[in-house]
Amino acid sequence: MLQRFVNPRLLRSALPALSLAVLLVAIFYTQPRAMSYFGLNLMLQYAVPIALATLAQMFVITVNDLDLSIGPFVGLVASIGATYLHDTPALGLLMLAGCVALYAAMGALIHLRNLPSIVVTLGMSFVWLGIAVLVLPTPGGKAPEYLKALMSIQVPLVPFPIVAAIIIALVVHFALMHSSYGVILRGAGGNPKAVARAGWSLLRTKMIMFGLAGFFGVLSGLSLIGLTTSGDAHIADRYTLYSIAGAILGGAEFVGGRVSPVGAVLGALTLTLAGSFLIFLRVSPDWQIGAQGAILILVLALRALISRGEAR
């Protein structure tokens, strides 16, 4: 019935934006004061690090893998950023570059040994967390001044988190979806045999995608301490679930290399605003994760309904 009036493919692509729009309407109806520059800036202040972590997860999903270590990894980056990057910048940058290289090596290990990415990344999550605790045993440290200045930029008319999210989404979208090599990278998840027959290295492709995930994880951790001004090994423990949920809300699928950078950022914004909406509804923090999961299930159910209509 639905496909008679609306193109199901177009509706599925627009679902992340529609979900965000519906949530915004609900927020403004519940709390009209939120419909202001200050209100949006306050609700979305942590949207940028969550969006960057979601994009990191999206790169891994693109090659049909799943990363269960991005949260602890962001915590490790935050710990390094608040200690070594602040005290000895050269050593801090070298450590962050090493973290990205280890992420790429993790992708190589998964490909060469044909290991389940869930198992490998789950194991690495404990490694990242252990190193983070060694770097910063207790919450503290100090974020570099330039990170704090960057994350506190005031943009006229539109809050900085929205502007930053738009720029990040567009840059990744054009690089991954509209470049010739972006087609190869997505093809490694959609049809790896065809990519290999065309002469492209699947090993290199997987290393690049995991390396990009590590790079965006570094950006996420640095932007996070720019907001919190200090570090903590457990500062991003929930980011693993947030990144998976945000990518899925944004239209990513676990098979076929089907992803949407713009959708992933919209999914991250939706999850960020969902937390504020639940606070406005006075939902207990103990129930907020479950409520966010219910929102995810609802959106997935709508997508399944639309996909069924598209198949018909």
Image (cartoon, rainbow, N blue to C red):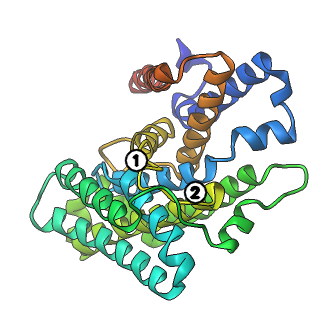
Residue drawn where x is 63% and y is 47% of the image: 46
Between 308 and 167, the residue placed more toward the observer is 167
Q: What residue is disc 1 on?
A: 258
Residues packed near mark 2 inside 10 Å, few (<14), some (14 to 19) or many (20 plus): many
- Is residue 227 left or right of 302 when viewed as pictured? right
Please tell me whether mark 1 sits on a helix, a strand or a loop. Answer: loop
Q: Position of residue 188 (x, y in %)?
A: 30, 61
Q: Position of residue 205 (x, y in %)?
A: 31, 70
Q: Which mark is residue 113?
A: none
Residue drawn where x is 57% and y is 30% of the image: 11
Q: Quadrant of residue 5?
A: top right
Residue drawn where x is 60% and y is 35% of the image: 270
Residue drawn where x is 60% and y is 67% of the image: 143
- Is residue 169 left or right of 28 when viewed as pictured? left
Between 165 and 231, the residue placed more toward the observer is 231
Between 91 and 292, the residue placed more toward the observer is 91
Q: Residue type at mark 2?
A: Leu
User: Pointers 2 and 1 in contact (CB under 8 A)?
Assistant: no
Q: Which mark is residue 224?
A: 2
Q: Position of residue 4 (x, y in %)?
A: 57, 17
Please tell me whether mark 2 sits on a helix, a strand or a loop. Answer: helix
Residue 178 appears in the figure = no
Q: Residue type at mark 1?
A: Arg
Q: Earlier in the sequence, mark 2 or mark 1?
A: 2
Q: Position of residue 140 (x, y in %)?
A: 52, 60
Q: Residue furthest right?
A: 156
Q: Quadrant of residue 183?
A: bottom left
Which one is in front in this view, the residue at disc 2 or the one at disc 1?
2
92 up-or-down from 139: above or below = below
Residue 277 appears in the figure = yes
